[in-house]
Amino acid sequence: MKERFMNLATCLLAVSLSGCSGENSAGSQETVQPSASVNQVTANTVFTNGNIYTVNPEQPSAQAVALKDGEIIFVGDNSQAESFIGDNTQVINLQGKMMMPGIHDVHMHPLESGSDTTHFSLNETETDVEYYIDDIIDAAARNPQASWLIGYGHTIEALLNAERDPRKILDDAVPDRPVIIMEQTSHSMWVNSKALALANITASSQDPIGGVISRNSFNQPDGILYDNAGDIVMEIAINAQADAGEKDYQGFVEYTQPELNKHGITAISDARTYWQRNHLTTWQELAKNQELSLRVSLGLWAYPEANDATQITRLLDMYQTSADSLLQVNQVKFYMDGIVGNTTAALHQPYEIDLLGLHENKGLNYFTPQRLEKYLKALEPAGFDFNIHAIGDRGITEALDAIENASNGKGRHRLTHLEIMDPKDYARFAELNVIADAQVAGEFTQPQHWQENIDYIGAERADHIIPIGSLLDNNARLTLSSDWNVSTFNPFVGIAHAITRTPEEISLVDAIKAYTLNGAYAMRQDDITGSIEVGKRGDLIVLDRDLFNSSATQIKNTQVVMTWLDGELIYQK
């Protein structure tokens, strides 16, 4: 890692930057006091004349920061920083620019979203899916060697409005090869007859746990697979590609990671590491080859259809943490439910429309609270933290119930999405020390779009979706993340939205903390990063504007000037 960062730094800077990285661990928490008579420590890098926001309540602002071997050894004013400057120290004049800790995005899908395993994308604004036929025929012609043709991008509404079975539409386009197309939320798949046959899905097939096989009036599968029913078939399709792992690897190295660094992101959680698709192997190869310029925590996917005892044993075998590695395998991703838009989010009260004929029309469970309790008792002692997808109010309540009943109190578990909430659950996050993780960067999360859910859940439940303000009012520990590629990974869009989504807006201070120190806490890295403090690592970003003197629109347009990881320059504008 050190050699790669040094080469990159040399290429990026017109002046040489000689800071070097030491071991990836925090040093002493004692403040280094400059001496007038003895120069105790000489820094590798000193930043001066900065508008530094530290996210440290004990010392919220500073002018200068000094780094040695990747560790922050001084935070203070310009005059004090001079004692850390030696003959070989690189002094970087920030010229009044804002510096802050690197961004933590604790929920994204970096391998899935940046990979070329998808052969084509459709126009998600198209409302008549019959018009997709020519695009799909063209994609098949451009990918003659693909054993499965994999696409992305339509909406479930377009499929439901089709005048004939979606399966037959795909059959017209590609009759001789299996085709699977992921809907833009990833919570349904559109498949043709060949795909259904290879997955052994017939009229007599039962719905899998956490999924629904959509059927026509003759009880035949109509080509729409909801939630886990679609995930199961997508796994077959991905695993049929011999080069899927290489595509995942190259997509991350060549596109995803450079873009994340460009946007000031220094730490991420992969929120759905499909280990049966060799995702874990890909991440381990990235770390082994010193390709990572991010701190990464993996959320191993908990397969709902798996045998619990077998899966628990396998998950325990995959646990991996090391202070010397940027890669940690210390989280597990569970889904409690689906989404509101296809009526699979788990609700306390029925939906206003009955789309899937589910029992009581209250959504579905990938994992019941009883099963989740079993996994908590088995995995928490090993050090695993749980990242739990919970969108509906019932799913949220059940996840909190499971944690209350089964957790040993040492986990840093988080519930993510939190769209439809029972206000009675607001205070339970602080009471149970459960992290509230939310995504507000997508336009669809903004208050002006809340009414789009009225047809599904009524006006009262459609109000106050993703209630981050109410959660903070009840002392929840909040993280903000992207769920990329569902929404942009640009954190400044998320911050701008978070501070303007009245009546559920939050302060700029809280929004920055959610993307930095709280994110570091969720990744068990708050002892080494997340704030600018003596003893922590040099994960720092420099911005082209002062967020505290910018409008929401200006914040949204923020550009990162420099990104540093472990005291090494990894991006410069």
Image: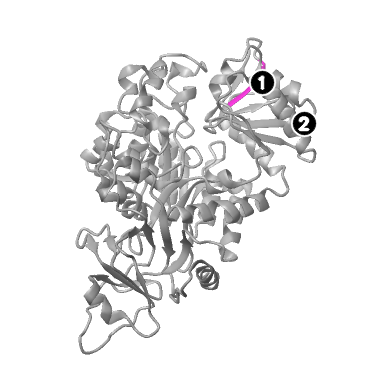
Q: Nearer the viewer, residue 162 or 559?
A: 559
In reply to whether residue 523 is colored magenta, the answer given is no
Q: Nearer the viewer, residue 275 or 441?
A: 441
On the picture, is 183 further left or further right than 363? right
- The residue carrying mark 1 is 131
| N-terminal-most mark, 2 or 1 | 1
| Colour mapping | one colour
**Number of callouts:** 2
Q: Residue at x 30, y 33 (%)?
A: 501
- The residue carrying mark 2 is 177
Q: Nearer the viewer, residue 556 or 295?
A: 556
Between disc 2 and disc 1, the foreground one is 1
Q: Position of residue 33 (x, y in %)?
A: 22, 78
Q: Position of residue 26 (x, y in %)?
A: 36, 69
Relative vertical location of residue 488 with respect to residue 534 in this rendering, above or below = above
On the picture, is 409 further left or further right than 12? left
Q: Position of residue 195 (x, y in %)?
A: 71, 29
Q: Position of residue 170 (x, y in %)?
A: 70, 23
Relative vertical location of residue 51 with respect to residue 452 in this rendering, above or below = below
Type of the residue with mark 1: Tyr
Image quadrant in which you'd find residue 171: top right
Type of the residue with mark 2: Arg
Q: CA distance from mark 2 to mark 1?
A: 20 Å
Q: Report whether residue 541 is seen.
A: yes
Image quadrant in which you'd find residue 403: top left
Q: Report whether residue 280 is seen.
A: no
Q: Residue at x 75, y 33 (%)?
A: 140
Predominant SS along the magenta part: strand
Q: Residue at x 39, y 78 (%)?
A: 44
Residue span colored magenta: 220-225
Is the residue marked by circle 2 packed among few (<14), some (14-19), or many (20+) residues within 10 Å? some
Secondary structure type for disc 2? loop
